[in-house]
Image (cartoon, helix red, strand yellow):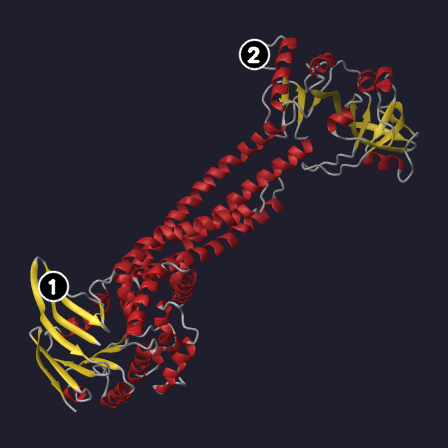
Amino acid sequence: MSAADIALDVTTSRRHRAAGLRPVRLLRLARHAAGALWSQKAKAFLMMIGTAVGIMLLTAVVGLSAGVQNRINQITAFFGPRSIMVFAGGGHLHGAGGRAEAGTTLKLQDAQAIQSQYGYEAVVAPGIFSGDANVKAGGVGTQTHIVSSTPDYSEAFDWYVQEGEPIDSDDERSMARVAVLGATVATNLFGAEDPIGKHLFINNVPFVVKGLLTSKGTSAMGFDQDDRIWIPLSTGMNRVFHQDYIRFIRLKVRPDYQVASVVDQITQLLRQRHRIVPPEQDDFRIITPDFIAQRVQSMARTTELVGGALALVALLVGGVVLMNILLLSLSERVPEIGLKRALGARQRDILVEFLSESVLVSLFGMILGVLLGLVPVLVIPRLFPMMPMAVSWKTFAYAALFSTGVGLLFGVQPARRAAKLNPVEALR
Amino acid sequence: MIELSNIVKTYLTGGVETPVLHGINFTVEEGEFVALMGPSGTGKSTLMNILGLLDRPTGGSYRLAGQDLTTLDDNGLSAIRNKRIGFVFQLFHLLPRVSVLQNVLLPFLYTEPYPPDAKERAKSLLQSVGLGDRMSFKPNALSGGQQQRVAIARALVNEPSIILADEPTGNLDSVASGEILEIFDRIHREGRTIVMVTHEPDVAAHAQRVITLKDGAVATDERRN
């Protein structure tokens, strides 16, 4: 043995020690571990079932969460992120899209008071929504929604006229019988003809078409937003529907002001005007995108909590099963461990091999679980459009995180036991 | 190559000290083929485990190729086992789930850096032991003698300084034993150092030197030509 060889010995062993967990070596050991799993497929399948079930539930829960978030984003976008709606009538609202009970408590003067006090903080558009009004033009009749609102309607709802003219303050002041049509109504009544300047009847009151609204299509909640006619609020109240109350006040908060503080201010103002002293119930309701988001979220929260808890339990049970199968199969593999130690495996190498097996088995369980979990995520929204579910990157991130976690957590004890085996006894 | 001085091994079982080796001294030169003999229970296996770095002596010093091994930790010992020592066991100890070729490549799993010509080395070794046409077989498709030849190829693949063989023919019939011993003769002629435990005198006859243990000490140490 030459001096060079001795030096080689020393450097080899030093390099071995310094090697630690070099990625190449880790990869080599993991590939070897994958082979070991492949050779006992039935056992590997048993080991991954628990993880698969847990990840399946997790996928479904995360899918629901993501769906709820999407739905909230859609509703917020539809509602307007800086918007406030004040509705007439008090009491609790059932669900985010719940219909307000008919209320007659909101007056035009309330809107005017808000306008005069806080008009610099928000655009204010009071109005009435009237469903199913009868509309006729020439020989054609149809039913549609009438929105009676002031000229600020356009700015408050971000909904402008595409052709012709919008309702202006002269129309409002003079109770003009002028109408601005949504695209659907225009087509229903006038087909391909240009409706501007044409005559129509709303509940038998004659009107002239003044303009056309831009088309907004179908809303997130599934109704045709273009099926509507906008007329001046004064005309609606006095000439068509004959009522002295309004149904809503729409506010769009201007960029430099906070939605929440505007809500507080108008709540105080309306309580004062309506002589309401808490704990007396308000006779109006104020709805904001945050409010809707909370409603939608609280509906989904129970399902998320139960599903999440079940997923966690399944992952824990799956992990314990995984650990026990690994511990049981350890006894069959004692000679293998002894051999590998003799061939130069360090304790850490054995640890890595066994941990790789448990992590790989968990990752395969994860793949199976994600595939199974995506079935309800993709199918349920098709069957029940009200159940929001969506595929999100979070599904895969959480699945990978939790399955790796299970593999490491429950694989570490068997792996340590394998690594600590005395090679002499293991080879016997 | 191997320098043992005053190697002592004592097992502690249930508070009782059982001495197995009391002061073994011998030196094996590079290229020697040594047979280790003696009745069972005399500490042959214990000595082999110490030589193979699978077990540590209670006392004494062991130098392999000039390096003192008593100070190395588990990682260091593992590296020496991987690079410097080739094991051949009585029961072959092949991994049943992988092919013959993969079995021979097994030591490289723990070799740093991984040799680029690993596969070529394994294949040519398998050819040299007459198993060039069995490389993709699983070990249990082979006869006992063939399995032991795979194990020898595996022991040689990392070009170790010494081969430690523990009754390599103990589980084989006389024909297969003859073939295995021929291979040992050949690798000895190629200059490798071999220490082989056996209790069959005709197997020991292949060695140039026979060390006999008795009651945990060297009883005889004979060289022949």
Q: Name the residue nearer the viewer: A294 or B154.
A: B154
Task: Indicate the amino acid at tag 2.
Answer: Glu
What secondary structure is marked by label 2?
Answer: loop
Q: Amino acid at mark 1?
A: Tyr
Residue B15 occupies quadrant = bottom left
Same chain letter for marks 2 and 1: no
Whole-percent x, y for residue A393 in the image: 55, 47
Estimate the x, y position of residue A208 in percent, counting from the top left. 90, 26
Q: Which mark is residue B11?
A: 1
Q: How far is disc 2 from disc 1 in space, using C-alphas?
A: 87 Å
Residue A10 percent coordinates (x, y): 29, 67
Name the residue at 48% across, 49% down.
Answer: A399
In the image, residue B120 sits, relative to residue B179, either above or below, namely above
Instruction: Find disc 2 in the rendering and name its residue.
Output: A280
Q: Are marks 2 and 1 in contact (CB under 8 Å)?
A: no
Q: Residues within 10 Å of mark 1 (few under 14, many from 20)?
A: some
In this rendered view, identify the residue nearer to me: A180 or A355.
A355
Task: Answer left or right for B1 relative to A23.
Answer: left
Q: Please say if A231 is above or below A352.
A: above
The answer to whether residue A337 of the structure is visible from this angle is: no
Res. A416 in view? yes
Say whether residue A38 is left or right of residue A119. Answer: left
The numbered mark at residue A17 is none
Q: Quadrant of the C terminus of chain A?
A: bottom left
Left of A184 or right of it: where is B24? left
Q: Chain of mark 2?
A: A
Q: Residue furthest front?
A: A3
Residue at mark 1: chain = B
**Which residue is at a point 41% across and 48% down the rendered structure image?**
A315
The quadrant where residue A7 appears? bottom left
Relative image position of residue B67 (x, y in whole percent): 23, 69
Vertical relation: B8 (above or below) A244 = below
